Image (spheres, grey):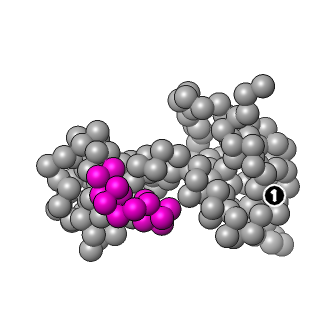
Amino acid sequence: MIIPVIEARNVSKVLGTGAGQVRALKNIDLSISGGKLTMLMGPSGSGKTTLLSILGCMLAPTEGSVFICGHATQGAGPERLAEIRRQHIGFVFQSFHLFPTLTAEENVQLALDVRGEQRRRAKAKSREVLERVGLAQKTAAFPRDLSGGEQQRVAIARAIVAEP
């Protein structure tokens, strides 16, 4: 049996309290296998960001269970969740979250530094991935010197450099 890369079982999320309480998700079941493109679509306010935050171990569900590569996230403390994210998850945020004082290469390399990758190897891998996303000539550029699309490709490179 193939273990799904991400699995959600009966996931619900309630945000807020009292009269301002909102049920963002209700009884979500989801299983995602590796090597496939999966798209999450829906209207504004339908819970897409909340679900992705839960699947990415950034937010805990109110009810239900999440498994990342067979590892349960339920009851995991902040350090264990950070470890799961480092080993298995790559994020590309909507606003990219690039560090303005770091070059494109340094922004990508940061994802390897937090994983304890050797500095020389991290630098080489960062350059390889920037080349793969078409930014070989922009490794020394700062985010302010890149177009929006180039910034997005740096964010993508950072997300995939550790092969999550």
Check if residue 112 falls in the magenta segment. Answer: yes
**Which residue occupies the foreground of this view, 163 or 124?**
124
What stretch of residues is rendered in magenta? Answer: 111-126
102 up-or-down from 94: above or below: below
Query: Can residue 50 be seen by looking at this rendering?
Result: no
Quadrant in the rendering for residue 119: bottom left
Image location of residue 43, percent across then percent down:
58, 42
Helix, strand or loop: magenta stretch: helix
Image location of residue 82, percent across then percent down:
62, 64
Badge 1: few (under 14), some or many (20 or more) residues near its Cα, within 10 Å? Answer: some
Measuring 70% from the left and 34% from the top, which residue is drawn there?
4
Query: Can residue 82 be seen by looking at this rendering?
Result: yes
Measuring 30% from the left and 64% from the top, which residue is drawn there?
106
Measuring 29% from the left and 41% from the top, which residue is drawn there?
133
Quadrant in the rendering for residue 3: top right
Image location of residue 105, percent across then percent down:
27, 59
Quadrant in the rendering for residue 40: top right
**Which residue occupies the foreground of this view, 145 or 48?**
145
**Which residue occupies the foreground of this view, 74 or 92?**
74
Q: Residue furthest left?
A: 137
Image location of residue 35, percent across then percent down:
55, 28
Question: Which image quarter holds the N terminus?
Answer: top right
Check if residue 61 falls in the magenta segment. Answer: no
Q: Which residue is mark 1?
A: 74
